[in-house]
Image (tube, grey):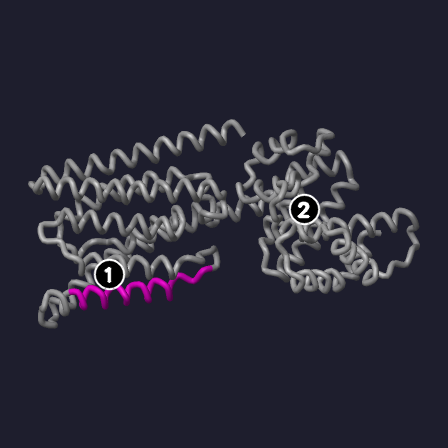
Amino acid sequence: MENEIKTNRLIGIFMWLLFIFSGALVLAFSFLSGKSYEAILRNTIVTMILTGTVVFMQQDAAGKGESSFFFDNFSHRYRFIVLYLAGIVLACVFSLIPNHFWPYMALFLMLGLFSNIETGLVSGIGFVAISVMLEENGNLSEFLMYVIAGAVILALFRNISENTAILAPVIIAMMVQAVLIMAFNVLFLNRTLSFKLLLIPILNLMLNLIIIMIFLNIYGVYVIRKSNDMYMEINDAEFPLLVQLKEKNKDEYYKAIHTAYLAERVAQGLSLNARAIKTVSYYHRIGVLEDKKSWQDISHFYLDNKFPEEAIEYLHEYVEPPKNQELSKEAFAVNICETVVTSISYLINKDKDVKIDYDNLIDKIMNKKIEDGSLKNYDITFREYDQIRKILKKEKLYYDFLR
């Protein structure tokens, strides 16, 4: 916890240093470019307002937790800081080259995927505004051209995952960029349509395409797949922590295994976070290794074994439910599946030859959740509740493995 607080403070300091640096850089660049004092003042103030807004959005998102960021960006917010630092420098440099060759579409995408869609969009808008303000004859049309293209590519990649097919979104984004560049030249600059005019968007698209493809490849390997690989490792039944649990308490181990199986089935049926649900099922009782139960006493297991931040948040929610706060569907899925496994195991341990009416038992368990009011603690609808009931009843053959 102390390390997390220190990290957040350090990130906050870097963010505000970035705010000061951005204003100072644009002020210096405006002065060296020979801008009027009015233009220097305008450029500096606008830059600091835009950067201040981005800093606020980042800090606000951080306060809401990992769900406000793509993948593991919450734990690696320095990526965005470094990218923003490079972006503010590039925004100044772009003002010195023809605007047709600005690779802002790629930069918008990078800013968004290293934070979230909203922050990426505002950051990109700010950079385009800076480039336009610093230009000799900057105008609104070129600003709109790149902002619209940036918004389109962010919208196309807002649901990116390991299985996302990137070809179609990239082609659509490139087509939009090409149309916007030609429209900018024909409609706003009153140029005649010619081969030379068609060559401009081609060069711009090639530059953006190269940057985007390289970035997406690196992002897929080191960000998306890295997170999935961590889950694959800790959700392996042979992971050292689970092996230790098996050696310490076989009953807890097998209960975790059975709970994880059922919870994963529920997650798949309701399109929930299956990998996080499986992790919670396996490890929420890992404190058995040291005969401890409180979050403060057991959280080191997750930190020492480098669990994904997302998984740690779900585990924290399950082990130590926050007061007066609605719990996730994922928490309910683990809770109800653990209750079913525990109930069946109890009946079997009491009488190994007992014949269990699984449908009736599941109905009793789930109806009791409604009667005692515990269902109100979770963010789940009655439709989803009935779906879970049906999924659990379909697993009758599996329950025999508990004997």
The numbered dot on residue 281 is: 2
Say what amino acid the circle numbered 2 marks.
Answer: Ser
Element at label 1: helix
Which quarter of the rendered picture does the N terminus lie within?
top right
Which stretch appears magenta?
164-184
Q: CA distance from mark 2 to mark 1?
A: 47 Å
The numbered dot on residue 205 is: 1
- Residue 273 as seen in the image, left or right of residue 87: right
Residue 329 at x, y percent in the picture = 62, 53
Residue found at the far bottom of this picture: 193
Does the magenta-highlighted stretch encompass residue 302?
no
Are there few (<14), some (14-19), or many (20+) residues within 10 Å of tag 1? many
- Residue 294 as seen in the image, left or right of residue 63: right
The dominant secondary structure in magenta is: helix
- Residue 189 as seen in the image, left or right of residue 394: left
> Which residue sits at x=14%, y=56%?
139
Residue 196 at x, y percent in the picture = 11, 67
> Which residue sits at x=79%, y=58%?
362
> Which residue sits at x=9%, y=39%?
37
Does the magenta-highlighted stretch encompass residue 171?
yes
Q: How many labels, in total?
A: 2
Element at label 2: helix
Please identify, in this view, whether the residue under mark 2 or under mark 1 is nearer the observer: 2
